[in-house]
Amino acid sequence: MRVAEHLNEALHTLLAADPSVHVLGEDITDPYGGAFKITKGLSTRFGDRVVSTPLSEGGIVGVGAGLALAGDRAIVEIMFGDFAALAFDQLLNFASKSTAMYGRQVPIPLIVRCPTGGRRGYGPTHSQSPQKHFIGMPGLALYELSPFHDAHALLTDMFARQAPCVLFEDKVLYTRRICRDGVVDDLFRFELTGGWARVYADGDLPPDCVIIAPGGLADRALEAMRELLIEHEITCVLLVPGRLYPLEVAPVLDLLRSAGTVCVAEDGTAGGTWGAEVARLLHPALWDTLSGPIRLVSGADSVIPTAPHLEREVIVQADTIRKAVLA
Amino acid sequence: MRVAEHLNEALHTLLAADPSVHVLGEDITDPYGGAFKITKGLSTRFGDRVVSTPLSEGGIVGVGAGLALAGDRAIVEIMFGDFAALAFDQLLNFASKSTAMYGRQVPIPLIVRCPTGGRRGYGPTHSQSPQKHFIGMPGLALYELSPFHDAHALLTDMFARQAPCVLFEDKVLYTRRICRDGVVDDLFRFELTGGWARVYADGDLPPDCVIIAPGGLADRALEAMRELLIEHEITCVLLVPGRLYPLEVAPVLDLLRSAGTVCVAEDGTAGGTWGAEVARLLHPALWDTLSGPIRLVSGADSVIPTAPHLEREVIVQADTIRKAVLA
Amino acid sequence: MIGATEERVRDLTPVADADLERMLRIRYFERALLRLFERGQLNGTTHTCLGQEHVPVAVTGLLDPEDFVFSNHRGHGHFLARYDEPHALLAEIMGREGALCNGVGGSQHIFHERFLSTGVQGESLPVAVGVALRLKRTAPGRLACAYIGDGTWGEGSVYEALNMAQLWRAPLLVVVEHNRIAQSTPTTVQMAGTVAGRAAAFGVLHHRVDAVDVNVIRAELAPLLARARSESRPVVAEIAVHRLGPHSKGDDTRTSEELREAAEHDWHPRYAAAFPEQFARLEEEQRAFVERVVDDVMIRPLSAWERP
Amino acid sequence: MIGATEERVRDLTPVADADLERMLRIRYFERALLRLFERGQLNGTTHTCLGQEHVPVAVTGLLDPEDFVFSNHRGHGHFLARYDEPHALLAEIMGREGALCNGVGGSQHIFHERFLSTGVQGESLPVAVGVALRLKRTAPGRLACAYIGDGTWGEGSVYEALNMAQLWRAPLLVVVEHNRIAQSTPTTVQMAGTVAGRAAAFGVLHHRVDAVDVNVIRAELAPLLARARSESRPVVAEIAVHRLGPHSKGDDTRTSEELREAAEHDWHPRYAAAFPEQFARLEEEQRAFVERVVDDVMIRPLSAWERP
Ligand SMILES: Cc1ncc(C[n+]2csc(CCOP(=O)(O)OP(=O)(O)O)c2C)c(N)n1
Ligand SMILES: Cc1ncc(C[n+]2csc(CCOP(=O)(O)OP(=O)(O)O)c2C)c(N)n1
Ligand SMILES: [Mg+2]
Ligand SMILES: [Mg+2]
């Protein structure tokens, strides 16, 4: 099953189980079912609870927050994550802030879904991975879809926080198969612990390097790990958190302490990255075991060109990760 | 002279020298002269080039970008930096992106001025320091006003980039005296090198600790340094960059290498901070000379309460910095 | 001049004690705040609704306890007209025990029962649409009411919200307190066209009231609210008012003529002249009451807050 | 049915070779793109303006070279109507040598002389206001023209821009290509009210044209543009059109009836029927020309870009 279908199924399950869940977004109703078809079938099955909206990214996040404030649960799809910039105020100054600024906890169960990433040739304003800009808003949690995490579990987790969450979903990941039963492929296995997916070739040996990456990077990280193992005899473990922020590092600290090299890879441009935040959390904890600073891999400090041969130059490739590990 | 008057003077000089400079913002014309009086006298002297706008933060940044694109130079005042969230899309997806996404450099000389920070009792939506959210937009540079940097020089620098810049201005700093001729007070001296202000009590000794902070933190950093020196006999040097991003660390690397402890302090809430970005740049360069990870001081992971006794708990105080250095 | 005044006096319909009392309470509350500021006993900022007190009193009379109210920076009147809790509001503004939001929100950020204010202009309109949609489903006949100023029509969020509200038939009441100014900027240089035109653009019902008489305002708005409730649709109620005081504190740059004009439209001397005995009685009551509120709250200990 | 068609045919005024040629060029250009996509020779996405070609051709005839044009996602026609550079546009879309923006911008992000497109709906309107204000000062009589779709009226930035444009008398021409749909969503469920009402809300002049005849469109819009130029003020030109093809590629979920209706309003068969000889001659010319453009660009090496 592809990740897109899996997520679609999770939404179906969620809406079926809880009549208070509402979904808003541009072009999300049937027969169109959303630009990436993630909401397919929802409007047919759940009617009014699934609404195609005008082009009003700020507005629909506000409406979602209003529904959530009043007792519903709301999911808002932003057609391209790039346009979440239009909802920045609603997220920063209303939805996240209102959970705490009235002197007590106010429940605002709101999920904003953002398809992200390049590699589809959509060009500079439709290919970004804007995760980093949303880090560190008090009251806002950030999640990212992965091939390993169960989408329904993630969504359930998010609603359970009773606070706004953004779910980032890599657009190429949509087209990839989900991994289940601990199996990734002929070489790699995985397990889920404490919200993290741990992906490994051989589970017993302490790895030479741990790669930490959000779900959208999984394909490229695995490709890099395969080459590193086969061509360089370097064993890596990949750690993929379901929740990017706030990040809980405790469950993986032992593993991280067993490796001298830690590398964080992400899409999104250089500067002020998620990796820098991960490093902030890990450097104090790993200061004595690290052989050098945590290595940060990100997209280039650049717009993302439309033409594939130019896009390739600025977007993280398997090889970018491989080189960072070898450096 | 207060920083507010100094900045006002710089704007006067800038507009007098260059007829293409236009200023837009809410309530910026005389007799009101802006919520913080930074634009006082400008409209009287420069007429139409200084325009009070409707409440349209996104729109006026767009208009500023349009003026800049067409050949003017534009300065847009956002009344409270918190509301720059409403202009996030214009900055991320238009102004900064347009400098590069058309395959060649397109000049967009635009400065967006944002009063920031708490300590004035304005409450959760009027007290934020949102610098961190703007880090790492390709094509966007971030500056911050300080008591040491010449405001006219900063503004001139920004326009010279021919690309959009955000200037953050601490609201309490407005009320503080500027420092000139290398003198801070009875104890401290400063000098400017490579865009950085270096503030020190005794310039010859290698310091025990280097504190890096944006201009808005200067008062609290100095207070901490004074106590550290007098009560703990710990010498600190304070480094204040005029440009926060992209940050040029080369001019201060030697100094940083001479200190075992480096501490970065900033306003703004915890998580995904500017300090994490500074640490990303510095850890590789200082790995061998640091006695431990770079220490990051920021506001709490919290909304900023209105009541002063509660606000104090979440905003960086001199003592927060002192404790971080002592830790 | 005297003739005109007399005419205006004659115009006022008899006012209920409860209404006049509330208008006066708000007036004295706001005055107390400015006094506390002058004396350095208040910190931060505040936006008083001096001259506009009758609007929330009139509107609140049309609201149901289950309606949800969104307020803005100039919200003390909106709150005090609806809730009999001046102590809790003042405690919030002063950061004292018994504060509505433990002193975290302060003057501009209040959440109490079905009342929520926030300090970013325009932001609450889409939120109000969401709340209205929920009410439509779970409590038909109830509405979400959002107070905004004329200047707030500069914000794009207002239009996104009106469009959605009309498309989805959200029972939303937008109360526009049109005081002809935004902070320091006259509406004429901020707003092209009219509020009526803006509502019409979306097919949203609109009614403008020019009166200061609470009964008249209420009577004129009642049918509008009735339609919002029964037809489940958004409506815009625009009320012409005059801001008597500064935008926040000490920041009034209007000419003395402009200030005089604003003062001429104040409901306070008109009600005083029209109903001298009733007015004197209630005014003395409320003056003394607010004084006691201030005295009470001033000596309370600081508010406590458990940070999440 | 036949009668109606004849009437429509009769309605068309004689068309200049230059106009019909450009309409046909755009038609063949867009068709070529869809064909290239089908064959897997184009990557990414593209939004063709099939059925809407006559709008930019009509509008461009009213523009001055010094006017600044803002285009959107559906911008090939806007560009091709103004610039005789189909090679450069196709090269941009295909990332080949000679591309307008070195292949960085692609279909949705073009900057060439005084033409700029971007892919975030509504974002360019405030920018256009800024450009218009500069033009007003430095080149009186010139204007900024921004093409937007009906769906884009969902975005708050549109209203912030209209308000400022009217307040500051910016010479701004907003061309609304009202094709009654936004991606997959009919305008009826996206837009409450009308474009005319939205313009009126700001006191902005508006004119709606329902014709497909380029000369008629031009004649109807000429006075509007003249006022924008001479009075320096914003105007909204709304043109009713029908989107013939998918939103981007292969994503048309309209019913066959809806598609038939769109096809019935297509200018193409009507011009073919009205001016058979002229049409056949120009069509053959442009078909062949675009084919050569495609052949030429296809074999070019990949574009080079120096990253800043
Ligand atoms: C988004 C936003 N921009 C600017 C401000 C600063 N501000 C607070 S009130 C105000 C004027 C509001 O005018 P209006 O809506 O007419 O309300 P009034 O103050 O007249 O009651 C401004 C500019 C704000 N709070 N939020
Ligand atoms: C801010 C933003 N939101 C959503 C989109 C995705 N999108 C691209 S075109 C489109 C529909 C636009 O409709 P309309 O304005 O009517 O133009 P048309 O496509 O009909 O020409 C949408 C939703 C976008 N590009 N930008
Ligand atoms: Mg007002
Ligand atoms: Mg359309």
Image: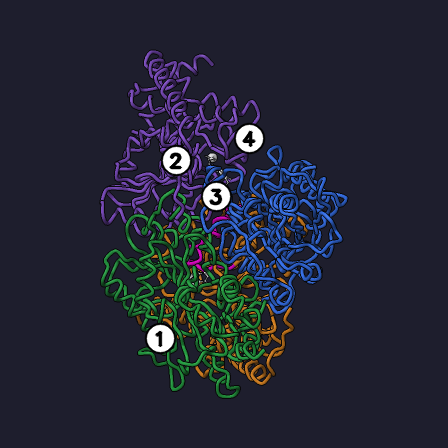
Chain colours: A green, B blue, C purple, D orange
Mark 4 and mark 3 in contact (Cβ < 8 Å)? no
Distance in Å between CA atoms under marks 3 and 4 = 30 Å
* Ligand 1 under 8 Å from disc 4 Cβ: no
Label 2: chain letter: C
Image spot of residue D1 (x, y percent): 31, 69
Q: In terms of secondary structure, where does tag 2 sit?
A: strand
Relative horizontal placement of residue D237, taking residue D184 as reference (left or right): right
Q: Which residue occupies 23% across, 57% down? A: A19
Q: Is residue D152 magenta?
A: yes
> Considering depth in this image, is D108 or B286 the residue closer to the camera?
B286
Residue position for label 2: C238
Residue position for label 1: A191
Q: Which residues are magenta?
A: D147-165
Q: Are marks 3 and 1 on the same chain?
A: no
Image spot of residue A248 (x, y percent): 41, 62
Distance in Å between CA atoms under marks 2 and 3 = 42 Å
> Considering depth in this image, is A129 or C150 the residue closer to the camera?
A129
The secondary structure making up most of the magenta span is: helix
Kind of residue at disc 2: Glu
Residue position for label 4: C251
Image spot of residue D225 (x, y percent): 55, 53
Residue position for label 3: B313
